[in-house]
Amino acid sequence: MNDERAALDQLLEVMHEHDLDALRLRIGETTYELVRRAERSSAAPPQASESAVPAAVPAPPPPVAHNYRKVTAPIVGVFYRSSAPGADAFVDVGDRVEVGQVLCILEAMKLMNEITSDFAGIVRRVLPENGALVSLGEEMFWIEP
């Protein structure tokens, strides 16, 4: 356990050195996701705002029709539903989307990446909250053809 903690401390140093907001690492069967979080109070030391624990397994989603297509995150990034604060969302539940239509933006390493739909259909679910950090492969939208 001490070796594991020392390795995680070294990874945190790498994150600080390269100004990374998130880092995902797989060692054997264990996946670690380190995420820099905003400090909650000015009295907290910088280390207190970071998490270095094995990634938790998310709760299973509610039952879904077998014909929904799922749009997943192609990168780790911050999920934004619109192009700017206060602007209309690219898509809402119930909207019809076409192949190539912009669904959201993922911000990664200060770059804004437009995520487009690979499917035509009706948006049935938007899973992440606006401003949430999404992981590689995490489901973001369910689209019914």
Image (cartoon, rainbow, N blue to C red):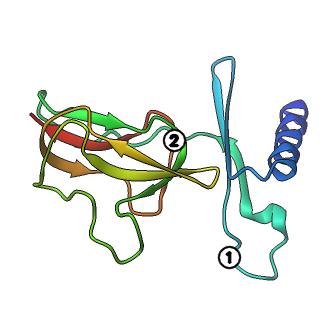
Measuring from the top left, give residue 62's x and y in whole percent: 22, 43
Where's residue 4, x and y in %? 83, 32
* Farthest bottom residue in view: 42
Give the secondary structure at mark 1. Answer: loop
Q: Is residue 111 left or right of residue 20?
A: left
Q: Is residue 108 above or below residue 57?
A: below
In the picture as drawn, the residue positioned furthest to the front comes out as 100
Q: Residue at x 50, y 36 (%)?
A: 136
Q: Amino acid at mark 2?
A: Ser
Where 33 sits versus 82, above or below?
above
The reply to whether callout 2 and callout 1 are in contact (CB within 8 Å) is no
Residue 142 point in image, percent of width and height: 22, 41
Q: Secondary structure at mark 2?
A: loop
From the viewer's perspective, tell me whether residue 77 is left or right of residue 11: left
Specify the amino acid type for callout 1: Arg
Q: Nearer the viewer, residue 16 or 108?
A: 108
- Say which residue appears at 67% left-offset and 68% top-offset: 38
Residue at x 22%, y 57% (from the top left corner)? 91
Q: Residues within 10 Å of mark 2 (few under 14, many from 20)?
A: many
Tell me if mark 1 has few (under 14), some (14-19) or many (20+) residues whose alpha carbon lies within 10 angstroms of its own: few
Question: For residue 40, which numbered disc appears in the image?
Answer: 1
Q: CA distance from mark 2 to mark 1?
A: 22 Å
In this view, which residue lies farthest toward the top? 28
Residue in the image at 19% along x and 59% along y: 92
Q: How many marks?
A: 2
Q: Nearer the viewer, mark 2 or mark 1?
A: 2
Q: Is residue 15 above or below residue 46?
A: above
Which quadrant of the figure has residue 45? Answer: bottom right
Apparent side of residue 39 relative to residue 9 in the rendered image (left or right): left
Mark 2 or mark 1: name the one nearer the start of the chain: 1
The residue pinned by badge 2 equals 135
Rendered image: mark on residue 134: none
